[in-house]
Each structure stands twice: as structure tokens, then as C-alpha cells.
Image: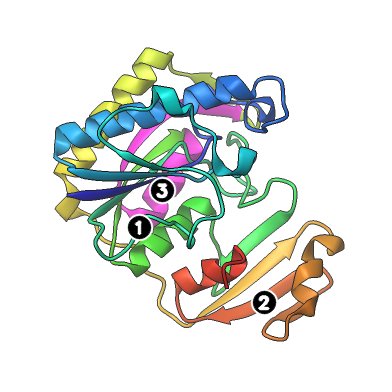
Amino acid sequence: MNLYMATDMEGASGVTQELMTFADQARYQEGRRALTGDINAAVRGARAGGATEIVVGDGHGACGGYNVIFEELEAGAEYHLGSPGQCYADGCDDSTDLAFCVAYHAMAGTYPAILDHTQSSRAIVELCANGEALGELGWTAAVCGHFGVPVGLVTGDDATCAEARELLGDVVTAQVKRARSRTCAICLAPADARRLIEEKAREAVARATEFEPFVIAGPITVRVQYLRTEQAQGWRRRSDVRMIDDRTVEFEAENAFEAMQMYAGYA
């Protein structure tokens, strides 16, 4: 069983503030420890469930895509650290059997939800596929789905878990906190959160054949709405996009992978 584990940081157990997710902020080291602990629990659970090859991708944008504490990482997995990689969701391909989304957060505009945003908490209002807004969870699932890979586990707050079930159906979720506002949550104790993640990871691998890939039929019309006009500046130089208004761009892609390749600057 080959497993790809996509990770973020805002959904890690105990994380409730941007002070814990930006590299130049006072509590960033706490966020790193929280993320590393959740990843380790998911790796342990996945291996107990039967995963034999595990690639973990550090997908949080801070610190150049290198947010985990390397010396504390669980044995039995490989870790994709730093950026840029070769492609979006580097480590997931058609040899992958199952994907996890660990420490994920709800899409922009969700309330209450811890640190809700889509791709950029400073720039993006909405990122749509064929008129439907998708968060980072949805886009990750769609890129994995392009390779025929289903998402089996999502960890994060209650809003993220609800988003996962609405989008992906009977996916396994590990709810490690309940959001009270964007920066406040009722959190499980660290040991309880990691125990839950480990149990759910083991369950997800055991149920791997029950999950269906999330596939967006192509071609896909992608629309990106920015918060401010200057944030769309890079797109104005391209001839293969349409400026819908001064802060909204639209382009066509054959599939979700190609869409995120273009959005993320790989194409």
C-alpha cells in the first residue's frame, strides 16, 4: 500500500493563532511541534493499518515549505521538505493507492473555523472550479483524484471535518478541535489528539478500497478572486488568461492537476 500524506499547519492539534503558523511569529515553534506530533501519529497509524510506502509532503507555505521538526519525525516514512518541488502535490502519482490530508483547515469564508483561508490568508478571496468554490482540501483531493487516488483521512477542526464529509462522502475524519471563532477553539489534549489521529489513520488504511477518488471532469474553468488589485498583477502579463475584473482572473485547464500547476506557477 502506497500512501501520500499531504499536510498543512492550521489544522494541527492545539493550533488556533497565526502566531503559530508564520515563521517570523513568536509561537511558530509551538506550531511546528504540533504539526510534527500530528504527522507522527498519522504515520504510526498508517503503518499499523498496512501502509508500506509513505511519502509525507510538507504543504504549509511558511519557512519555504519546511515546517516540521526533522529530528523528531517518525521512522518508516519519507518526507518531502522544502520548495519548490517538481509539481503540485509532489509525491502523489498513479502509483499511489491512498491519500491523507493532515492538519488541514476549512476554506475561506467558513465560520466558525480555525484560520479559514484558501491558499493565501492574505490574498485569495475565492478559488473556483467550474463555478464552485473549493478550499485547499478540495483542490488537494481533486489533484489526487486526477491520478485515481482517493483521500481516506482528513484531520483538523470540526468545520474542516464537515467540509471533508460534504465533499468526499464517507471519508474518515479526526476532529482534534472545535472552532469557536477564527482564532479560538476547544482543543483535545495533545495525547488524546494524537491517539485519535493514530486510530483514524489505521482505520482509513484498513478501509482504503472503500473510498472513491474525487474527480472534477475536465475541461475546468478556474477563477481566482484576489483581495486587492495588485495581487493579480502577475496574471496581467499572460495571454492565456482572462481578467474578469481588476482583481479576478479566469483560465482554462484540462484537469485539476493542470489547473493547480498553472495556479501554483509550475506551468
Q: Quadrant of residue 61?
A: top right
Mark 1 Cα-neighbour bin, 10 Å: few <14, some 14–19, many ≥20: many
Name the spot of residue 18 as percent of width and height, x first.
68, 30
Q: Amino acid at mark 3?
A: Ala
Tell me if label 2 and label 3 are in contact, CB under 8 Å.
Answer: no
Extent of the magenta region: 158-180
Dot 1 amino acid type:
Cys
Mark number for residue 92?
Answer: 1
Q: Is residue 8 visible?
A: yes
Tell me the CA gap for discs 1 and 2: 26 Å
Residue under pointer 3? 164
Q: Position of residue 13 (x, y in %)?
A: 47, 25
Above-or-below relation of 123 to 7: below
Q: Residue at x 45, y 29 (%)?
A: 70
Q: Which mark is residue 250?
A: 2
Residue 13 in view of the camera: no
Q: Amino acid at mark 2?
A: Glu
> Is 161 covered by the magenta stretch?
yes
Q: Is residue 80 left or right of residue 40?
A: right
Q: Nearer the viewer, mark 3 or mark 1?
A: 1
